[in-house]
Amino acid sequence: MGRIALRGVRAHGAQLVLSVLAVTIGVAFVTGTFALRAMLASTFDGIVASSIQADAYVRGASAAGSALEDPAQLGGSRSLVPADLAGTLDERDDVDLALAEVSGPAVLVGADGTAVLSTQAPSMAIGYDPRDPGPRVVDGRAPENGSEVALESATLEASGLAVGDTTDVVLGDAVHPVRVVGELSLSAPMAGATIVLLDTTTAAMTYAPDGMVPSIALYAADGVSPETLRDAVAGALPGDAEAVTGAELRDETSSAIADQLGFVSTFLLVFAALALFVGTFIITNTFAMHVRRRTRELALLRAVGTSPAQVFASVLGQAAVVGVVGAVLGVAAGFGLAELARAGLGAVGMELAGSLPVTTVGIVVPLVVGVVVSVVAAALPARHAALVRPVEAMRADVVRPAGPGVARVVAGTLTMLAGTGLVVGAAAVGSGGAPLLGLGAVGVIAGVLLLSPLAVGPVLGVLAAPFVALVRPLGGLARGNVTRQPRRTAATAGALVVGMALVSTTSVLALSARESVTGIVDEETAADLVVRSATPYLPEGVAADVRAVPGVASADLTTYGQVVVDDEPQLVVGFPAEGFGRSVRTTAVEGDLDAYARGEAAVMADALDEHGWALGDVVTIADPTRPDLPAHDVRIGAVIDSHAFSVDMLLPPDVAAAVGATTPEMLFLDVEPGADVAAVRDGVTDAVAPYVVASVLDADEFAGEVASQVESILAIVYALLGLSVLVAVLGIVNTLALSVVERTREIGLLRAVGLGRAQLATTIVIESVLVAVFGTAVGLVVGTGLAAALPSVLADEGFTTLAVPWAQLGAMLALAAVVGVVAAAWPATRAARLPVLDAVSQE
């Protein structure tokens, strides 16, 4: 049967091309995801290796936060250690060199006068000690005082500066004019990070004025192993410090990064799975039509003694061949996608290191996935092939039931009811109903797919009415062709139903999120102006300079920081009590804000159960970077319900400062009564101009900017969902092409009685448009209906408004008609070119 399967593939190869293409697309995405993840991991491993080169490190013993939350501390956010400990350790016989490592956020002004920023990579300054064996001077020399800097090679290129140029650097609370005196290499691409190197004195004054640093790098003396050095040094350290080997720190940091990359991989693989799922519609439809066309051939095989199992195996064998060919092509295409992604990331400043990773897992897994998906998709048509009776070989024509069977209707109805029940239950549960909503959505979509043949006749009857009335007799002919086989039409449109259901849900989510965020910002923001930064922090000097601008009545500064609340890491925000009502319209739902003004904490209402908090509780808050400082017992004096702050706890400024939550985030400004807001804004803009990254927004612009951050995330989802829609379009092309082959004799007869080539092509185009619009319409209805549950389920995330983008959904329907025309181009051309006599004589 293996030879029969291969002969079947060779004989009907053209009919299987688009099935191969569907597998290729899905597998390419899987392969590209594995390859991209490997390149990212290789890049970050290189960064870790070049940044952690010492034999051992001394660091704080207390940990809080992850390695990615603080780019200045590759080992994660930990307690600090005294910088002068480096001098003590440097005197040991087993230590060749001990260096206190100093770094912190910085903003470099490029040659064009704007900040040098790329993607989400950090922008930081590092204290450079000439004794450090890691960095290497490529050009010029190392900085020697506060008026000089050196730049990492990629940073120098991205900035447009050259050695010898003058520019500005924002360090801490001041803008410093500096000269670029050197270019240094850190031995590995830094994935877009902006790195400025300072002399050790300037770095210490800026980032370690209290003499505390994140870590001390130790290089072992000759003959001393890293483990021996670690164990020997550990006994000489104070209780709030610990020693680790460089290998341990590298492994720890790489592991934390791998966890983050795992999420990215999972996210991408979900969309790859979606593409493969949609591709199963093409494969199933292809083999269903393939089996139907070969009914007499298969019956003859049965008549000469072939068993049902052998016929079943032969069809699955053909599917396996399709899977293997598609998977092999997909692996090759996937590596091409990975290279394309590398080029795209490089264009925005994030250079990925290493060659294209070719691993066993990265090749075998996509290959297996492609074959398995193809075989599973072909299983049902293969079963139908196995059930062909030998007597059917004697019949001139075989008519199979085209409508949905009773079992399918019952299964579809039960699935639909179960899914709808789960969706309604999710809406009733509210914020905890996301899992129910996901399961319900799967049930609803599955039910719709099972029941869709029932809708083919009525819905397409309505959709085809304009064509029937305006394009006679072609419209009626096209309508008959697409409604004659409702299962086939439903299967063809099924891929579009799934894709457009997800697209419409995302569209509703995007608009609703924008409207919700805009509404929240408009409702809760009382300030006249807002000063924000293009970086995760606002330079410290901005607040003082803005307050000095004439016409500014108040400037409420928000700060943030990682703290430890009752031994649990928490991100908290510092905000002045007088800012409530003045800058932010927030009231207490329990307690009162007067208690907050007296130095007590305010917590979010939806965080009480999560953390076990209650009004009146006393929590212990500590600065994780300074275990030598006393912890603070803070009473919870107010419970608020606000979406203006994305944290669970707010602290008054003095308390926030005492526990280390001091990183400036943004300023809310009120102008003096009677002052010209536009004039004050101009003054504030001039005041923050030297800091490069700060921008001044009015209330409407602030709301729009916050909302645009949500849209930028969803734009990625749109792009990935487009993949499933592309595969769905291939399904329409495939079905139409196979339909032309299946209807060859019918087409010949129509041509023989006077149907012209253009009329035939028009008929097929109308069929394609009807199928595309049908699938899109059903998908949009399903997706919009599912999205109706989102306000209840995502209420705690600030989702307060359900907004349906009717114009966008209408545009999708119009686009579906265009897609139908494009999809029909090749099948219509092929049909029009069929020789009439050959077509009429076709068996």
Image (cartoon, rainbow, N blue to C red):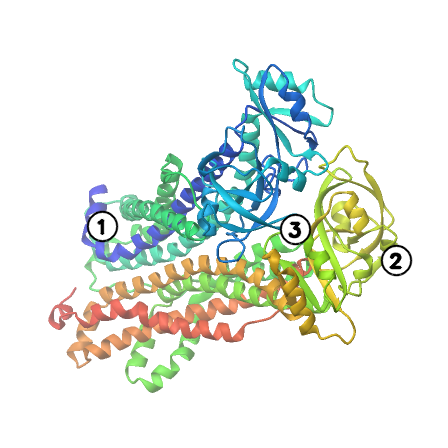
Which of the 4 image quarters holds residue 461?
Answer: bottom left
Separation of disc 3 and disc 1 at Cα?
A: 72 Å
The residue under label 3 is: 174
Separation of disc 2 and disc 1 at Cα?
A: 79 Å
What kind of residue is marked 2?
Asp
Mark 2 is surrounded, within 10 Å at the Cα level, by few (under 14), some (14 to 19) or many (20 or more) other residues, namely some
The residue under label 1 is: 9
Q: Is residue 233 left or right of residue 407?
A: right
Which residue is at 52% across, 52% downward? Answer: 116
What kind of residue is marked 1?
Val
Q: Residue furthest left?
A: 837
- Asked which secondary structure carries label 2, the reply is helix
- Say if residue 669 shows up in the picture: yes
The residue under label 2 is: 594
Q: Nearer the viewer, residue 105 or 560?
A: 105
Q: In x, y percent, where is residue 271? A: 46, 53
Q: Is residue 381 left or right of residue 742?
A: right
- Asked which secondary structure carries label 1, the reply is helix
- Mark closer to the chain start, 2 or 1: 1
Which residue is at 41% across, 72% downward? Answer: 815
3 or 2: mark nearer the eye: 3
Q: Is residue 90 left or right of residue 629?
A: left
Q: Nearer the viewer, residue 118 or 504?
A: 118
